[in-house]
Image: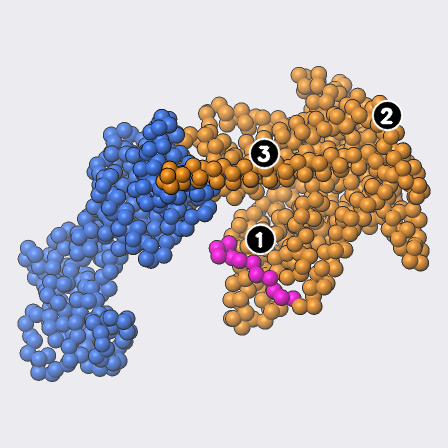
Amino acid sequence: MAAVTIRGLTKRYGDNTVVEGLDLDIADGEFLTLLGPSGCGKTTTLRCVAGLEKPDAGEISIDGRVVVSGRTFVPPEKRDAGMVFQSYALWPHMTVRSNVAYPLKMRRRPRAEITSAVLEALEMVGLDHLADRSVGALSGGQQQRVALARALVARPSLLLFDEPLSNLDAKLRASMRTELHAMHERVGTTSIYVTHDQIEALTLSDRIVVMQHGAIHQIGTPEEIYADPVDRFVADFVGFENFLTGIVVDVDTWTSVVKVDGFPTALLARSSKHRTFDPGDDVTLALRANNVTLTDFNAASAATSTSAGTDGIPATVTGVAYLGDQVEYQVKVGAHTLKSRMSSPVRWAEGDQVAVVLQQDSLLVVKES
Amino acid sequence: MTRLAKPALIVFVLMMYVLPLAMVLYGAFRTAAPGLPGALTLAGFAEAFSDRRTYETLGSSLWLAVMTGIGATGLAVVFAWIVSRTNAALRKVITPLMVVVLATPPLFFSLSWNLLGTPEFGLLNQLLGSIGLPGDLVSVGGGWGTWFVLSLKVCSLGYFILIGPFLAMDRRLEEASLISGASRLGTFARINVPVMAPAVLGVFIINFIIGLIAFEIPLIVGRAGGFEVLSTQIYAFVTNETPPNYAAASALALLFVVAVVVLVAIKWRLLDRRQFTTVSGKGAKPEPWDIGRWTWACNGFVAGYALLAFVLPVVQIVLGSLQPLFGVNDFSLTNYEALFADPVVLPALGNTLVLALVGGLLAVAISLLLGVVGRHGSIRMRRTLELATWLPWAAHGIILGLGLVWAFLTVPFLRGLFGTVWIVLIGLIIASTPVASRTVDAALAQVGKELEESARVSGASQLRTSLGIVTRLILPACGAAWLITGIQIAGNLEVPILLSLPTNETVAVMVFQFNSQGQTTQAAALFCIVLAAAAAGGLLHLAIRGVARSVAHLKIGEAKSWRLSPSEA
Ligand SMILES: Nc1ncnc2c1ncn2[C@@H]1O[C@H](COP(=O)(O)OP(=O)(O)OP(=O)(O)O)[C@@H](O)[C@H]1O
Ligand SMILES: [Mg+2]
């Protein structure tokens, strides 16, 4: 097991800078996920750590040993890592057993040890009964397990995963996710996991790194990322759907009061831990759709809601989508469009007047990214 | 790869593939024959380009190039289309047929069509005569005959380049266009044609180049009808003049080299970058159109081609080899007996066999080395290596031979090798590298990069990965490449015709000599021996693959039962 340190990692393809000055520390035994939209440089970062790609600048060390820096370059086979590829990359001319035994053979382990270690690894992924199958005769999920066993078998100090579940169907993906989690609990190897699936990132990771355009937006535990995104990009990525821009009118330690054009009253919002604001600042408020509730429009209640509270803002329904157990409404408040998700059945139709209630504490002030 | 290995490889490649060409350039400016003291001059150019015949042959060469481009590309497109887009029953025989045509040396086609097209005596004319038509209806001598035979032979190469893109072209692309409201014809014009255009144009350029540099078929088929092209003219400068006019030959050769290099460059610039992005392979499943009554036209076309390119030539050459005099239907083994009684034939056969086996193996090994290195090197390195192995193509056969003559007689420490079998071997390896290398590259392209990367991460070194994973995976393809390259070498006339001496002649040269001395039936018999050996090699190859496959099955089966028994017990 090993800690990994990345400093100033930069990788270019021609004029295209894919990763730029990336700094990252991964603790011993940690499960870290790189999350981000397609093309943001996740795979490239992972391949630099594996040694499959030579960075243009920067330094990487694994377990205190510098593997890339200036002219130093430790080739992949000397980095003691295991990797699970998106395409599984099983060697078609070998059986399941020989595929899994390969890393041990390369490490020149004695025969008896290889036999038992391979069996153990295959038992761990539940495939010991298929050891002598040719890998061509396996289903996608089984191939994925063999790839996992191969990555684990030599007990490498670092495990690397590049979207290992993306070729599987939704059901299998969910069960493999659980298995991967259990496996990490058991083995505890430092792991770097690349995905653009939010759920995978949230359920598996100790910490998540959210990337865009080859740079890091936020690093944090799943809870931090989910509840407290630093900026609009991260908030958008973890499922905030409503964004309102406004001006700060008052602040204290935990909350800010923000005036948003078109809303009858100023809104009370939680300040992000990551930044303090001053009155007069332009800010963005982020809000999840299921924190926006609608009630029947009632002229009397609308007239009385004059406090800094957030209930009963008059609005018009502009769209309704039935999602099964939930219904998604689009409502217009002044010039703003908000999305609201509530449990079924459908209660309003397009054109209805409603009152919008924003749940206490659900508004979050984020940086405009 | 260590630091020294890379420069060493580049030097090796330059020596093998670039030096001979450079020597042609050098030779074009020399007054004296290779190896003799002389000065630099433009006399060679003056002589070659003041001759009016040069311009005539240049015209003929260009005509042949354009026509071969059209003819061979057209055939290749039709066959690729039949295989990928129709349900004609005979489409299944096209690929095997094309393998055979591709692997068979041009010498075979020239010999047998030369016989087939002989007025009155050729098989074709006899057949036509027997149904009451004039017996000299078919005559292949001359330009049209050359074009016809060349197109029959050369379309096989284009077919293998096109079949991949044609099969990979997703039917969805066409369906999406139909659904968007385009007609069948509109779809063909707006979708199929643009999508396939880069690949087809690429094949056209390749066929154009082949038409420009072809040697054996114009030499044997064309010359019989007074049709001269540049390559035969170069050959004439060296063999028909005493002393051989190497300078004029080189000056002409240079014209070729420039033309071909320019064409290859055009092809790269225009096409290669696009070619890989034209067709999406994902989820593509070729589904044939049901073409109804047109099936018969397609089947007829395939059958006609098989007859002309394979069945008739083989029957003719076998029949011819059994005739004492061509056209005399008095079959016996006299020719074979005479051949085996001839003291020079057996050594030549042995010599050719060794050249084919050793040269083929080395050419495949070099191709594999360059392919594997190119896979990991920078784009620039890959391009350099690729260009180097394409060069002998530019300087095909006769020019390569010329370059090697210059190289071996001018470079001091190589001079000792002149006249030995080594120079022939080297020439044949160089000449067959393009074929070997295309075959090996195609196989290498099938090995996904991640298969290699996972081995590296598992702890295997670069070398070990290249040998244990990549080479192991493409081993069967390497076997096939060896076989095909070996056959190319055995049938190659262009290289040994200038480089070998009577003491180390190859069968191809001997066949050519028999043929030009009018002993056509002996030539046919000798070539039949080569064909038989090649066919035996092909069968051996299939047998080995079959055995390897069943051994693999056995092993897995054994291992399975070994695994099962303890748990059952
Ligand atoms: N070999 C290459 N040559 C040129 N550009 C490349 C190469 N590999 C990747 N890129 C570019 O680098 C960028 C980052 O690629 P990378 O594969 O790291 O993205 P990613 O975050 O893994 O995306 P995805 O989620 O789609 O896998 C992309 O814009 C890609 O086009
Ligand atoms: Mg990726």
Quick check: A282 above or below B468? below
**Residue tagged 3:** B367
Which residue is pictured at 52% across the width and 40% down the height?
Answer: B553
Badge 3 density bin: few <14, some 14–19, many ≥20, Cα 10 Å: many
Which residue is pictured at 65% across the width and 58% down the height?
Answer: B82
- Inter-mark Cα distance, 3 to 1: 24 Å
Q: Which chain is blue?
A: A
> What scheme was used to colour the molecule?
by chain
Quick check: A135 above or below B418? below
Q: Amino acid at mark 2?
A: Asp
Confirm whether the magenta stretch covers residue B284: yes
**Residue tagged 2:** B342
Magenta stretch, main secondary structure class? loop
**Closer to us: mark 3 or mark 2?**
2
- Inter-mark Cα distance, 3 to 2: 37 Å
What's drawn in magenta, residue-wise?
Answer: B280-291
Do the residues at pointers 2 and 1 share their chain?
yes
